[in-house]
Image: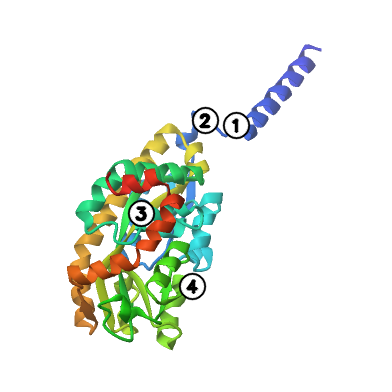
């Protein structure tokens, strides 16, 4: 009889342990010893600084976890069929573990993300850095957390420049009627309509072919993307107007992050921040070389004067009139450093 009672007690204890493991999302004491095979999506190609930073994160995680944390990298949004919008949605839901994506793409989840790329908000990176290291960056992290994403760090896609195959763009008048590809963010659609273009939204994976076939006349992107995607082969002109800053988020699914042990969370935070900072450093180092390479390849670069830039700024003022309430006045003030 004693043996039978002991057997029932053991079964009950085993069942309780199993149920406890299934019903508790809190990290357990042994979570630091768990092995992880994670998938990370990168929007652009292996030749980009984005991918370089992802490789650094992969190598650092493997080294510091003694191979316990493995990160598989997928360039050109292979995990989302070339659709960066689907990538951030998948990250939010947890079907992708980590991504390197622009806040512009995150705007499909929440219009507030668009504030970081408001037209002519920043003149240069000296104005950008304190904002993302301070209140502006903190506020974006809070919004990301609401959407199920934990931000490990901020990278930099850079200032977005305009390319086209038709003419040298020096004023809003030069843009009239041009078919310009833009990311699928409503703010950019409104902005380019104010500038008189015929804005076209499509996934980036379709852009090169569309430019090659003449379906669109131009597009806008930072130098690193233009160079690594070899858009100079299908675009003759580039306007260097720094019209919109494009930050990157090195994001991790929040539920996954929260399930990690405290030690692993600290590891991801530290190495993620270092990888993002490395990407910014590499992007800024390479930009001058990439600009020179694009010019050598035959692209004609135009740098608008202050007077010409003032015309563009005036033309897009209605965007601020419409979006200040959408972004939130406090959030915009944080990005203006007010």
Q: Give the percent coordinates (x, y) of residue 178.
A: 39, 81
Q: Where is residue 255 in the image (x, y as percent from the top left)?
A: 52, 42
Residue neighbourhood size for the residue with mark 1, other residues' Cα within 10 Å, grouped as few (<14), some (14–19), many (≥20) = few
**41 horizontally vs 124: left or right:** right
Nearest to N terminus: mark 2 or mark 3: 2
x and y percent of residue 37 in the render? 49, 50
Label 2 sits on residue: 28
Q: Nearer the viewer, residue 277 or 14?
A: 277
Q: Is residue 64 visible?
A: no
Tell me how far mark 1 sits from mark 2, CA to CA. 9 Å
- Dot 2 falls on a residue whose secondary structure is loop
- Badge 4 is on which residue? 202
**Image depth: mark 2 or mark 4 in front:** 4
Mark 4 secondary-structure assignment: loop
Between marks 2 and 3, how big is the CA–CA gap? 37 Å
C-alpha distance separating marks 4 and 3: 21 Å
Within-10-Å neighbours for mark 2: few <14, some 14–19, many 20+: few
Identify the mark nearer the N-term, 2 or 4.
2
First-in-chain label (4 vs 3): 3
- Mark 4 crowd level (few <14, some 14–19, many ≥20, 10 Å Cα): few
- For label 1, the SS is loop
Query: Relative to 270, is 285 above or below?
Result: below
**What is the image's colouring?**
rainbow
Question: Do labels 4 and 1 touch, CB within 8 Å?
Answer: no
Q: Is residue 142 left or right of residue 11?
A: left
Whether residue 239 is visible to the viewer of this picture, yes or no, is yes
Q: Do the residues labelled 1 and 2 touch (CB within 8 Å)?
A: yes
Disc 3: which residue = 116
Judging by the rendered image, the residue that carries numbered circle 1 is: 24
């Amino acid at each position: 009889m004693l043996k039978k009672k002991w057997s029932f007690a053991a079964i009950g204890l085993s069942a309780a342990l199993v149920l406890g493991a299934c019903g508790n999302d809190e990290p357990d004491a042994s979570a630091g010893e768990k092995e992880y095979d994670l998938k990370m999506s990168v929007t652009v190609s292996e030749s980009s600084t984005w991918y370089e930073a992802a490789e650094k994160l992969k190598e650092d995680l493997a080294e510091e976890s003694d191979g316990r944390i493995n990160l598989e990298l997928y360039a050109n949004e292979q995990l989302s069929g070339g659709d960066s919008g689907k990538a951030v949605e998948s990250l939010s839901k947890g079907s992708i573990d980590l991504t390197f994506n622009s806040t512009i793409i995150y705007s499909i989840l929440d219009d507030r993300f668009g504030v970081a790329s408001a037209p002519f908000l920043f003149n240069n990176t000296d104005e950008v850095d304190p904002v993302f290291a301070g209140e502006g960056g903190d506020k974006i992290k809070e919004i990301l957390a609401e959407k199920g994403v934990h931000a490990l760090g901020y990278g930099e896609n850079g200032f977005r420049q305009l390319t086209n195959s038709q003419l040298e763009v020096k004023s809003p008048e030069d843009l009239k009627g041009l078919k310009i590809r833009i990311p699928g963010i409503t703010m950019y659609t409104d902005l380019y309509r104010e500038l008189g273009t015929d804005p076209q939204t499509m996934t980036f994976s379709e852009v090169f072919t569309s430019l090659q076939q003449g379906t669109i006349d131009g597009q806008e992107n930072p130098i690193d993307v233009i160079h690594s995607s070899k858009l100079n082969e299908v675009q003759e002109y580039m306007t260097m107007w720094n019209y919109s800053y494009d930050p990157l988020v090195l994001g991790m699914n929040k539920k996954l992050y929260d399930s990690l042990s405290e030690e692993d969370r600290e590891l991801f935070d530290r190495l993620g921040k270092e990888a993002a900072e490395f990407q910014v450093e590499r992007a800024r180092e390479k930009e001058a070389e990439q600009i020179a390479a694009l010019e050598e390849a035959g692209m004609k670069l135009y740098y608008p004067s202050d007077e010409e830039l003032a015309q563009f700024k005036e033309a897009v003022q209605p965007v601020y009139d419409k979006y200040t309430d959408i972004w939130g006045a406090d959030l915009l003030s944080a990005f203006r450093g007010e």
